[in-house]
Image (cartoon, helix red, strand yellow):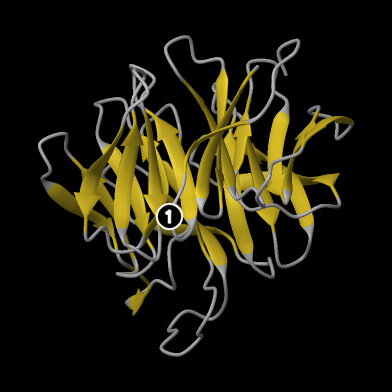
Amino acid sequence: MAPGATVEKLAGGFEFTEGPAADAKGNVYFSDIPNSRIHVWSVDGTLSTFRENSGRSNGLAFDSKGRLVACEGGTRRLTSIFPEGEITVLADSYDGKKLNSPNDLWIDPKGGVYFSDPRYGRQDGLEQDGHHVYYLAPGKKLVRVIGDMVKPNGLVGTPDGRRLYVTDEGGDKTYAYRIEADGTLSDRRLLVEKGSDGMTLDEKGNVYLTNKSVWIYSPDGTLLEEIEVPEAAANVCFGGRDGMTLFITARKGLYAVPM
């Protein structure tokens, strides 16, 4: 955290905030899952609604063309939203069966999308044989890249596209994987025996986990800092004009702290 900085509440009154993602200007988009909305906190400090009826979107991320890619847990699909509002379905099934409830995602340098597919709450209507992680390469078929977790949730990759961090929230562990040329994963390594909801990285490669507080770990798993938040933290991203503000979605509120 920046010297003397404190966690500030920017907005409240939501039902369950999640999935923050910053666009190229530093505006931060985030989901209010139960209300099925995507909101925007702009760099000038104003709040607006980007999309109603968002399919109970959760995790969000921007691709290289400025499109917002969303994990729609309610409609059980992965979508791409153009700035004008046009929606394209990227994936809604695997092996001919409906996805569970896409949760969190990361877009690699090639434009491929890794996403987790757990199900929280009611378990009726599930067609997959468990809770897994998938990879969708541009123009390719959806492939399952992790099939041995209890309930995967947050994930994030390094900017060079060589390493992917994935948390098994159901197993209360977070792992690091090597990303192969074809997008598959290998060389699993335990980062820390702590599960997480959402995740992000900073420019030094430190891993930010959300588990009530925000926990910051070095790439070798050393705990560096804990940032306490008034409400239980669910996800994090960097945004703002200089990209150095940490935005935190935490239950009914949106928070920020200068880093």
Residue 54: x percent and y percent?
26, 57
Give the quarter of the image for residue 158.
Answer: top right
Q: Give neighbour class at mark 1: few <14, some 14-19, many 20+ (Cα, 10 Å).
A: some
**What is the quadrant of the C terminus in the image?**
top right
Question: For the residue labelled by badge 1, is the local secondary structure a helix, a strand or a loop?
Answer: loop
Q: Say which residue appears at 26% left-offset and 44% top-offset.
A: 139
Residue 185: x percent and y percent?
61, 46
Which three-letter amino acid code belongs to the residue tagged 1?
Phe
Q: Considering depth in this image, is 121 or 7 the residue closer to the camera?
A: 7
Give the quarter of the image for residue 120.
Answer: bottom right
Q: Considering depth in this image, is 48 or 189 the residue closer to the camera?
A: 48
Residue found at the very far bottom of the displayed protein: 124
Q: Considering depth in this image, is 122 or 256 the residue closer to the camera?
A: 256
Residue wearing tag 1: 14
Residue 258: x percent and y percent?
61, 18
- Left or right relative to 4: residue 44: left
Residue found at the very far right of the displayed protein: 222
